[in-house]
Image: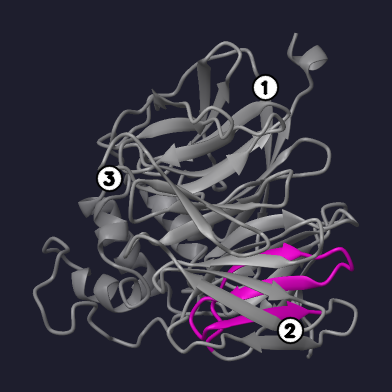
Amino acid sequence: MTRLSIVSLAGALLCAPFALVAPAQGQGSTLPDGAGRDLVEAVCTSCHGANQITRSSGYTAEGWTELTGTMIDLSGSPEDQARIVQYLETQFPPNTRRAPKLMAGDARIAFTEWQVPTLGQRSRDPVEAADGSIWWAGQWGNLVGRIDPATGAMTEYPLPANAMPHTVTIDRAGDVWFTGNKNGTIGKLDPATGKITVYRMPDPAARDPHTAVFNEKGILWFTLQHSNMVGRLDPETGDIKLVPMTTPNSKPYGIKVDAEGAPWVACNGSNCLVRVDPATMALTEIRLPIPATTVRRLDIAGDGMIWYVNSSQGRLGRYDPKTGAIKEWPSPSGPKSHPYAIAVVDGIVWYNESGMRPDALVRFDPATETFQSWAIPSGGIHAGIVRHMLPTRDGNLLIHQGSTNRILLVTVQPPAAMQ
């Protein structure tokens, strides 16, 4: 497999700017009338829905120029670029309709950003390898990429057709595993050679491997959201086993492994958490108190507590596997804040409020039950949604802003510096 460098990809486009494909296939436009609307529909909504524009926080001309420049290269058509920006600036100026409620506090953090090479790829799910490099999945670009944080150098690796990776994770040998969310596969990339090994799902109904995580024995566990399954892959043999979820349409999403080696799964279509028996794959379902609850992701603290985001209700939750006790806290921005990604680092719970613009990074201290939050930057603007977050080995946090093709490192200052 040939490696592609940042130089060769810097001007690449994912979506052709003048395909002139109406997003609604002949249906009425959802964008307001105005000069340039047809061009915006052809260029912008051929890649994503118009609601990504109409539900944004709006920008100045400079902001819209920066934002669109992370998605598609219009430098060769300056007149069309000017028409697009003028329309967006006129119809969608800055607004505060979905502004988060940011909470003050004593903690201090810093953001380091990398804009990845291929435009419009929806970079996501960064993870740190043992050598300190950062890997990400470029879902719409059908690639995985690597960042050297010391130099900023980036390398992108194209994947087999229609893999559309949803996440990446690293095994103990340093190989990079990705979920083929569109073609029903799990893949392994050898960074030293570029060789890719593909494992196909044994059941045609298993269409969409989603999030994956290794346990201490090197077994890969993964969810299949719309297929409503949980899977297990043994890298030594290539054997894959699948089990259906207990509740129809429970949409297994996030997955983590506890200290005993048991995977825990978040239900994005039902009010449940699920424990998977690592030996038999038997499922134990824990029903959460609010029936309308859906859970994007969860994480497991050092004391064994299961922390989860109650995404549909705008709440942060905790489940105690020993006692069965469940407690939830309203997120600062309220019931429409849609918490999404979550990670527990050194006893502190971090998550984001994806329903807000800008997307807010929230810190929750269980000892004091207090919140603190920050707007997540994307260059000179605020745009995008964090869909997954993972800690680094030194207690920092990796997040992303897929809409602007950015990977971010959140550096958490130690207590002494905070004091």
Which of labels 1 and 2 is toward the front?
2
Magenta part of the chain:
162-189
Residue position marked by numbered label 2 in the rendering: 238
Q: Amino acid at mark 3?
A: Pro
Query: Residue, x 88% and y 56% (percent of image)?
Result: 130
Residue position marked by numbered label 1 in the rendering: 108
Q: Amino acid at mark 2?
A: Gly
Left-right relation of 388 to 18: right
Q: Nearer the viewer, residue 302 or 142?
A: 302
**Mark 2: few/some/many CA within 10 Å (<14, 14-19, 20+):** few
Left-right relation of 202 to 251: right
**Mark 3: few/some/many CA within 10 Å (<14, 14-19, 20+):** some
Q: Nearer the viewer, residue 312 or 363?
A: 312
Residue 127 horizontal/vertical position (percent): 72, 56
Q: Describe the element under mark 3 as helix, strand or loop.
A: loop
Asked if 337 appears above or below 184 in the picture, the reply is above
For marks 3 and 1, give the CA distance.
Answer: 31 Å
Label for residue 14? none
Residue position marked by numbered label 3 in the rendering: 93
| Figure quadrant of residue 43 | bottom left
Q: Nearer the viewer, residue 352 or 174?
A: 174
For marks 1 and 2, give the CA distance.
Answer: 45 Å
Q: Earlier in the sequence, mark 3 or mark 1?
A: 3
Q: Earlier in the sequence, mark 3 or mark 2?
A: 3
Which of labels 3 and 2 is toward the front?
2
Q: Describe the element under mark 2 as helix, strand or loop.
A: loop
